[in-house]
Amino acid sequence: MPSSRQNLLLLSSSSSSSSSSSVSFFILNTLFSTLLFTSYAAIPNHEASVLFSWLHPSPSISSSFSNWNNLDSTPCKWTSITCSSQGFVTEINIQSVPLQIPFSLNLSSFQSLRKLVISDANITGTIPVDIGDCVSLQFIDLSSNSLVGTIPASIGKLQNLEDLILNSNQLTGRIPVEISNCIRLKNLLLFDNRLAGYIPPELGKLSSLKVLRAGGNKDIIGKIPDELGDCSNLAVLGLADTRISGSLPVSLGKLSKLQSLSIYTTMLSGEIPPDLGNCSELVDLFLYENRLSGSIPLEIGKLHKLEQLLLWQNSLVGAIPEEIGNCTSLKMIDISLNSLSGTIPVSIGDLFQLEEFMISDNNFSGSIPSNLSNATSLMQLQLDTNQISGLIPPELGSLPKLTVFFAWQNQLEGSIPSTLASCSNLQALDLSHNSLTGSIPPGLFQLRNLTKLLLISNDISGALPPEIGNCSSLVRLRLGNNRIAGTIPKEIGGLGILNFLDLSSNRLSGPVPDEIGNCTELQMIDLSNNTLQGPLPNSLSSLTGLQVLEASTNQFTGQIPASLGRLVSLNKLILSRNSFSGSIPLSLGLSSSLQLLDLSSNGLTGSIPMELGRIETLEIALNLSSNGLTGPIPPQLSALTRLSILDLSHNKLEGHLSPLAGLDNLVSLNISYNNFTGYLPDNKLFRQLSPTDLAGNQGLCSSIRDSCFLKDVDRAGLPRNENDLRRSRKLKLALALLITLTVAMVIMGTIAIIRARRTIRDDDDSELGDSWPMAISLHSRN
């Protein structure tokens, strides 16, 4: 049985070998598993080391990342870190923490990373090129940092990427074409960087793209690629504040899901394509501050979901299409600063949700439709700078939410509707530069929210109603250039926060009420060109913030209040063409902010106060002309080195002009019709003065010859000023008298000598004449 024994042996041997093999496999498998587990355990530790070494220099490590410990075997419990079940980092999410470190993170160490968010963290440096090795990345947000350099082309390797958010950095270079390889990309946000060049047409391949925003990159140029019309899921397209040029592609009309189109402040030209009417989901259409031409397409009426239409500051022409009334979701229309014409469509009244309607600075004509009152949500109505005529519809008073109504610079006529007093939320009403008549409705001053009432340059008459004091919210009241008569009511003192009061060029009379001093916030008062009388109230000194006081061309009398010198904020004081008397208050020298002082054409007397020389801020003008001022120009005025205009004409001033020699900033000077004497300062202005600026000064060398200027006087040895001139005249007179006496004495002496010699020669015994002693005397002196 050797063969069977042999078989048994072989079987036994085979069984033994198989058993040994199984044991070996088990041992190897266990060892491999242990090594694999150990290897897996080691990799997270490496991720922790990379993260910690990157963040360690940051000053925020101790506060915001206190649980980051380099001794941890895994970072999975660290702040801002998320891991997978296997212990690999899948998310880094750091937001609004001032890291203040370079972006030197070794991203290739994070093969499982799906989400990378480091935003508003002040990281610097460049985006690492190895970001393309994180092939699992789906979401990248590095916005609002200080990153520089280019967007790495390696991002194109991220096939799973859905969101790339790099806005608000300092990235430069072009938008890489390789981004078009990120076929799952939904959101691409690159706005507010320093990117340049063209928008890659290849972006049109991103069929999943929903948001593309690249605005605020001022060096992006060229046309909008037609291919963007192939991004069929695009909902937001933003290219504002770039140098995009050319026309809007017709292909944008294919974007049936487009909700927001923002391409403003660019170099877009051409017409608005009618195809945009196919973008039925469009909510926001922002095309303002471009160079668009042509008309507003009728097809815009198909945009039933449109809420905001902003086309201002273009070159659009034609009329507002009546079809705009079909855009029943519209809340804001701003088509100002174009060349649009025609009338305001009646269909605007069908826009019941309209909140803002702004058509300023166009060529619209016709009347204001009364059915605008149907737009009961209207808050802003701006119709200014057009050719709109007719009456202001009383129906506008039924707009309960109206806060702003501007219709200035039109051709409106008739009276201001009293119904506007029902607009209880009205804050600003400007109807200036029209032909409105009648009186101001007293009810307007019952509007508790009214801050600005401007009715400048109309034909409004009547008196200021005492109800004016009830409008305690008024900040600006401008009623200039009308025919308002009567007095300024004392109730004006109730306007406690008023800062601008303009009542100029009316027919107001009577005094300025003392109560004006209660308007303690006033910065500007213009009462000019009225027939106001009496003295200026001392209560004006309570207006410590007053910057401008204009009260020229009235009938004010009395002295200029010395208390005006307390107004340290005053920069313009104009009291010309009144009947003020007395002297110029010395206290005006305390007006440390004064730039313009005009006291001309009054009855002021006395001298120019030397204190005016302290007002070193006086740089626009000093006009003291047409008064009765006397005395010399005070030397202290030489400190007014900023002064541009000086008028001292038509007074009784005297003395020399040397205090004006150093006023090199003067561009205009008039000293005519005074009593100035002496010579002219030698500077550019005086050499360019016309004779009329110097006329009427009898003692002034004013022929504009070289000999009239001080430097030439020095060279000629002529007198420099009035005192020198007087001394010179006395010296000349004394010298002339001395010469005359000397000559006379010489002649008389000569005659006497001749006669004496003749007498001696004749041996005459007659009595000597009267000349003898003189002759002897003279002879003896010789």
Image (cartoon, grey):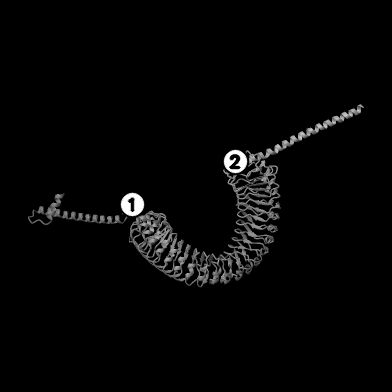
Q: Amino acid at mark 2?
A: His
Query: Taking 437 as reference, is 120 left or right?
Result: right
651 in relation to 42, above or below: below
Which image quarter is the N terminus in?
A: top right
Q: Earlier in the sequence, mark 2 or mark 1?
A: 2
Could you tell me if residue 574 is visible in this image? no
- CB of mark 2 within 8 Å of CB of mark 1? no
Q: Is residue 531 visible?
A: yes
Q: Which residue is mark 2?
A: 56
Q: Give the secondary structure at mark 2.
A: loop
Mark in front: 2 vs 1:
2
Give coordinates of residue 567: x percent, y percent: 42, 59
Q: Amino acid at mark 1?
A: Asp
Q: Is residue 541 left or right of residue 447?
A: left
Observer-nearest of 83 and 141: 83
Q: Find residue 362 and name its label.
A: none
* Quarter residue 267 falls in: bottom right
Q: Position of residue 221 (x, y in %)?
A: 62, 52
What is the crowding at mark 1: few (fewer than 14 residues within 10 Å), some, or many (at least 20)?
few
Q: Residue at x 89, y 28 (%)?
A: 6
Mark count: 2
Q: Quarter-wise, where is residue 29 in the image?
A: top right
Q: Tell me: 553 left or right of 413.
A: left
Give whichever of 43, 770 is nearer the camera.
43
Pick whichever, 110 or 664, lies toward us. Answer: 110
Distance (Cα) linking label 2 and label 1: 79 Å
Residue at 29%, 56% in the rendered image: 723
User: Residue 17, percent across and down?
Assistant: 82, 31
State whether residue 28 is above or below residue 469.
above
Residue for badge 1 = 714
